[in-house]
Image (cartoon, rainbow, N blue to C red):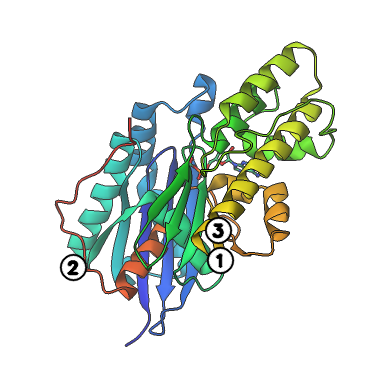
Amino acid sequence: TPAKLILGIDTSCDDTGVGVVELSPDGRVHVRANRVWSQTVHAQYGGVMPELASREHVERIDQIMGDALTEAGLRVTDLDAVAATSGPGLMGALLVGLMYGKGLSQALDVPFYAAHHLEGHIFAAAAEAELHAPYLALVVSGGHTHLFDVPREGEYVLVGATRDDAAGEAFDKIARLAGLGYPGGPAISEAAQRGNPDAVPFKEPLQGQKGFEFSFSGLKTAALLAHRAGARPEDLAAGFERAAVRTLVKTTVRAAQACGRQTVVVSGGVAANRALREAFGQTGLRVVFPGKGLNTDNGAMIALAGAAAITAGRPASRLDAGATAYAP
Ligand code: KG4
Ligand code: ZN
């Protein structure tokens, strides 16, 4: 059997992502293309406008799809399977990619796989290093801060999550407060290098807890108070980043010990953070991060989730597979 070419589509939020992954008969995966159109219309509103996101996906998806095929050096008829995110995400936005993927699979007469967005984030790491259960997975993005134990392939046990804001959301909000721009993650990271992390006191959240929860609203409040008291943006950035990185790493390491896992996958937009990568590198655990361009939302990670489904022998999804919105 020759290698399989899988197209992956993600339109769960404000990025139109289409990627192509090659799945070898021995189960190895290779990203052939990964194209993302990041919507900029939302910047003027200070947050994602769902209806505008849907419309932009409709306007862009054909072009991004064409770009991905060109990057992979393929024709659409070369594809062996199509995968698309079915949730969680913004309902209208999700439907664009999901319907596009279903229609494409029908036209090409190839199997269709509906993918879970968080499974996509986790499988983004599979293109970087071989990933076999059991392992622990931290998905840390603008919408999620979720810690899963993966005892067996395809089984996800939620061991902890955020009580309030997602980590990326805190990066974005504090960056906006400090006037550091958008998206906040890279802006905070850059400013932090020029700042003094000891200038503004940030208490590490939920210290002494027995569980594996996260909380970022206290850091946000501390940043607001310090900002009002005249703290420098780069000091705010340095202090906040250090506290955020510490709570993410410490809680994940404790969870890995409690679950008896030696391998940890850290994925999602915040996994691109340099300080976070360095701190995880010093834990003694085997930590796998997605490669460049695979941390933030993208289509290749959904193609990788499709590849994992094929490798696991999962049946293809029915064409009436529905979309699921973010949990309220
Ligand atoms: O995974 P993603 O693209 O979208 C969601 O599913 O939410 O993650 C986007 C989030 C944003 O909050 C952004 O600020 C954050 O990831 N992010 C970072 C970095 N790059 C992106 N946070 C910290 N450091 C970074 N270098
Ligand atoms: Zn995401």
* Left or right side of 162 for 192: right
* Left or right side of 203 for 122: left
Q: Quadrant of ligand 1?
A: top right
Q: Which tag is nearer the camera, tag 1 or tag 2?
A: 1
- The tag earlier along the polypeptide, 2 or 3, is 2
Pick the front one: 53 or 274: 274
Residue 309, quarter of picture: bottom left
* Left or right side of 145 for 233: right
Outermost residue toward the top in this view: 228
Instruction: Tell me the element at label 2.
Output: loop
Residue 240, quarter of picture: top right
Residue 113's x, y, as percent?
27, 61
Q: Which mark is residue 263?
A: 1
The N terminus appears in which quarter of the rendering?
Answer: bottom left
Q: Which mark is residue 18?
A: none
Mark 2 and mark 3: span between their CA atoms? 43 Å
Mark 1 and mark 2: span between their CA atoms? 38 Å
Residue 261's x, y, as percent?
53, 65
Q: Which tag is nearer the camera, tag 2 or tag 3?
A: 3
Whether residue 48 is visible here, answered yes or no, is yes
Instruction: Tell me the element at label 1.
Output: strand
Q: How many marks?
A: 3
Whether residue 71 is visible here, answered yes or no, is no
Which amino acid type corresponds to the residue marked 3 in the rendered image? Ala
Q: Which residue is mark 3?
A: 256
- The tag earlier along the polypeptide, 1 or 2, is 2
Mark 1 touches mark 2? (CB < 8 Å): no
Residue 121's x, y, as percent?
46, 54
Residue 273's x, y, as percent?
66, 47
The C terminus appears in which quarter of the rendering?
Answer: top left
